Each structure stands twice: as structure tokens, then as C-alpha cells.
Image (spheres, rainbow, N blue to C red):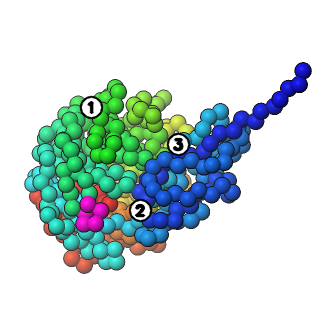
């Protein structure tokens, strides 16, 4: 009897977000070119045999406008199914800055001068909130929608962003969250919105479709005590939740449903008042700002399981670190200190092990609670609650040192609490 040997082959694909330019070309294994013209799902035409390796790279970056696209989860060994988890994220220099003004219950919007960093209010700013006391903001990866968490209303507002002007328009009814929502995150594919509910010790998850948000099955999900900060890994496989009692919960994200499952070993220890978490672009390092303990915890990240391993003892800051962000190159961490001096500190990240070394500080404003970095890494911003302002700095590419731009700080609104850059 004759026998036939069939070689199992499967497709490689994923999703592209943030694409605004033209000419993006992806490549698999240095041979299969794919031109991508729009955000959304993509798939290479050539299959890869089971057991063979695949490697997705950017062959040609987009132009008009010029953008930088990076690939996450782009390599591996082909199993017995199509690969659909590759994430390609495109970004450019920030064009608009948005500030949540907690006391005024408004959102300030500014256009950014790409050369100088100078902020100019967009027409109609500040925009009225759809709830009371906005404390957190998040923008979807395509820069189409802005989400605002209202701590006193237990809701999340949804605004569409005018691409030409940066103006905000209410896009849909407010989303009902849990008690006292304190932080927001959108996964890298733009499919899910996560809300940390500090008053109910839960995380709400919503599926996103053209700005509309629908609770996923099982939402809300249990988190730690007073969840205060959220961060997804660059591939959108895991959600990291800091809680103010001093721990980090790690939850696996089901890419098909958005449901969350606590990973083995979670929660992981942090410091008292764990207020915020930031992750390096590689996804292999994470840092937690511990406000009450006056420390920063550093971790190595297992990218396959999401587990955290503490890197030595927490770094003493002799201040009260509240917010933290890592620059797009993964060279520096910027941390706001809620102290009488109201400064923002620059920490150099050691390439060998991710250790932090304080390199410089800069005066921001009274009670700097929020920090953000431009997608190009050129500018750093702080939202200063006490002075109702936004401080803007240029970042030295070699040292990370911050220098205030002309005109900084810029007036925002009463209780400026959080900032997001589009």
C-alpha cells in the first residue's frame, strides 16, 4: 500500500495599530513581503511548516507622515495552528496632550509644537467631563478615542479625537465601572479597555468596537487591595496591577475574549503604596513606584509566563515616587516625586541588568501626580495637581537630563491629575 507524507504548514499574522503613514512593508523570514495600508489584522501569504521558525520584521517604515513601527511577539517556532498574535505598533512624535483636571471636572487639550514642545490649547479646550473628578486617561493605539476615568462617578467617559485639530467630542454614553476607578489601560491591539476600581478591589474589562465598550464575560475580576496602577506587556498577553497595600497582581489576558486569569505565583511583592508600574519596551523589565515606602521596585519579567522576579532590594528614593514611565528606547525611567520640592527624577537603566541609577532631577510643579513621555522620546510631561499646570521638558538623548521648554509650565485646570499623549 502506498503512503503519502504531508507537511503541515500554517499562516503567520497578527494586527497593526497606530498606522497613519503609507508604505509600511512587513517581512517574514526575510523573504515574504507584505504591504500594509491600514490598521487591523494582517496575514502573510506564504505558510510556514510546523517546527520551522518564523521571524516578522519591518522592511520599510511608513512615510507621510514618517513613523516608526515596532514588532512584538514576532518570532517563534511554528506549532500546529496559525499564528495570529504578532503585534505591530506604529508611532510618531506626539501631536496632542490631554490633561485630566480632577477638581474642575474638565479635560484640557493642547497641540504640541514638534520642534520646541510648546503647548497651545486646542479650540474648545478645556472640554467638559461626562462625570465627576477625572483622575486617569488612556488613548487607544490608533489615536481615535480618549477614555477618562471618573473617580467620583464610578464611570469612564469616551471621547472621539479630531485627528486634524485634537478637539474632543463625546462619543458614547459613559461606561459604568466599579467603585472609585483610579487607572486605565488599553491593550496594544486596541481591543480591550481595563479599569482599576480602587474602591471595589477589582478590574473591569470592556471589549472595544468603534469607541463603544461592552463588558466581557466575568467582568469585573478580583484584583488586590486598592488597585492603583495598570500596565499591559508590549504584546498584550498580560495585565499588571499594582495595589496600594504593596503588591503586583499579574493576570493573563485571553486574546479572544478579554477575560483575565491570575497567573501562578501572583501577586508578587512590591512596596507600601505601590502606585504605578512601567515596563521597558522589550517587555523584559518592570518598575513599580512605591509612594509610601519611598522606593522603586525593579523586576525581570518572564515574557512567556508573565511572572516577575525582583531584582535585588528596592531602590530608596528619599522621596514619595507617585508615577513612573520608561522612555521609548528603554534607556531611562522618569519618576514624579510628590514632595514639597515637586520634582521629576531621571534614572538611567543599566543595559546589563536593568538596574536604576539616579542621574538628575528637575523641578516640575506643585504635587506632580502624572508623567508621560513623547512617543519619540523627545519630550517629558508632568501633570501638577497643586498648581493646575503641565510642565514640559526636553530630554537629552544621551543622559536623559530634563530641561524645561520655553513657556513651561502651561496652565491646565484645577487639580491637574493625569496626562496622556497622542
* Residue 266, horizontal then vertical, whole percent: 43, 32
Residue in the picture at 52% in, 62% down: 24
Whether residue 226 is situated above or below residue 415 in the rendered picture: above
Is 335 colored magenta in this rendering? no
Q: Which residue is mark 2?
A: 20
CA separation, marks 1 and 2?
Answer: 38 Å
* Residue 235, horizontal then vertical, whole percent: 48, 46
Report the disc number at residue 201: 1
Is 164 colored magenta in this rendering? yes
Q: Are marks 1 and 2 in contact (CB under 8 Å)?
A: no
Q: Which residues are magenta?
A: 162-166
Looking at the figure, which quarter contains the C terminus? bottom left
Residue in the picture at 14% in, 61% down: 126
Q: Residues within 10 Å of mark 2 (few under 14, many from 20)?
A: many
Looking at the figure, which quarter contains the N terminus? top right
* Residue 189 in view (yes/no): yes
**Front: mark 1 or 2:** 2
Q: Residues within 10 Å of mark 3 (few under 14, many from 20)?
A: some
Amino acid at each position: 500500500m502506498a503512503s503519502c507524507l504531508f507537511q503541515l504548514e500554517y499562516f503567520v499574522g497578527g494586527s497593526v495599530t497606530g498606522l497613519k503613514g503609507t508604505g509600511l512593508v512587513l517581512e517574514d523570514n526575510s523573504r515574504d513581503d507584505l504591504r500594509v495600508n491600514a490598521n487591523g489584522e494582517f496575514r502573510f501569504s506564504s505558510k510556514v511548516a510546523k517546527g520551522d521558525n518564523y521571524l516578522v520584521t519591518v522592511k520599510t517604515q511608513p512615510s507621510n507622515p514618517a513613523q516608526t513601527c515596532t514588532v512584538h511577539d514576532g518570532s517563534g517556532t511554528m506549532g500546529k495552528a496559525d499564528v495570529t498574535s504578532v503585534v505591530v505598533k506604529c508611532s510618531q512624535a506626539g501631536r496632542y496632550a490631554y490633561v485630566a483636571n480632577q477638581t474642575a471636572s474638565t479635560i484640557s487639550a493642547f497641540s504640541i509644537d514638534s520642534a520646541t514642545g510648546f503647548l497651545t490649547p486646542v479650540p474648545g479646550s478645556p472640554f467638559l467631563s461626562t462625570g465627576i473628578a477625572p483622575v486617569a486617561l488612556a488613548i487607544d493605539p490608533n489615536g481615535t478615542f480618549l477614555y477618562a476615568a471618573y473617580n467620583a462617578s464610578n464611570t469612564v467617559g469616551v471621547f472621539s479625537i479630531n485627528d486634524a485639530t485634537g478637539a474632543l467630542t463625546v462619543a458614547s454614553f459613559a461606561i459604568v465601572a466599579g467603585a472609585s476607578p483610579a487607572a486605565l489601560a488599553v491593550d496594544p491591539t486596541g481591543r480591550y479597555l481595563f479599569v482599576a476600581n480602587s474602591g471595589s478591589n477589582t478590574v473591569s474589562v470592556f471589549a472595544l468596537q468603534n469607541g463603544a465598550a461592552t463588558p466581557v464575560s466575568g467582568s469585573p475580576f478580583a484584583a488586590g487591595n486598592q488597585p492603583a496602577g495598570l500596565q499591559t506587556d508590549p504584546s498584550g498577553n498580560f495585565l499588571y496591577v499594582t495595589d496600594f497595600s504593596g503588591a503586583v497582581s499579574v493576570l493573563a489576558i485571553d486574546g479572544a475574549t478579554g477575560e483575565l486569569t491570575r497567573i501562578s505565583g501572583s501577586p508578587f511583592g512590591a512596596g507600601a503604596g505601590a502606585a504605578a508600574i512601567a515596563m521597558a519596551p522589550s517587555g523584559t523589565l518592570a518598575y513599580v513606584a512605591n509612594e509610601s515606602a519611598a522606593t522603586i521596585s525593579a523586576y525581570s519579567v518572564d515574557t512567556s509566563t508573565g511572572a516577575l522576579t525582583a531584582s535585588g532590594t528596592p531602590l530608596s528614593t528619599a522621596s514619595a515616587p507617585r508615577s513612573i514611565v520608561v522612555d521609548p528606547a528603554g534607556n531611562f525611567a522618569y519618576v514624579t516625586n510628590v514632595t514639597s520640592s515637586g520634582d521629576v527624577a531621571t534614572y538611567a537603566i543599566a543595559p546589563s541588568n536593568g538596574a536604576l541609577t539616579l542621574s538628575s532631577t528637575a523641578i516640575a510643579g506643585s504635587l506632580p501626580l502624572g508623567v508621560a513621555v513623547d512617543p519619540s522620546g523627545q519630550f517629558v510631561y508632568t501633570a501638577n495637581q497643586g498648581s493646575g499646570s503641565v510642565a514640559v521638558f526636553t530630554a537629552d538623548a544621551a543622559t536623559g537630563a530634563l530641561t524645561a521648554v520655553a513657556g513651561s509650565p502651561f496652565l491646565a485646570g484645577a487639580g491637574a491629575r493625569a496626562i496622556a499623549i497622542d
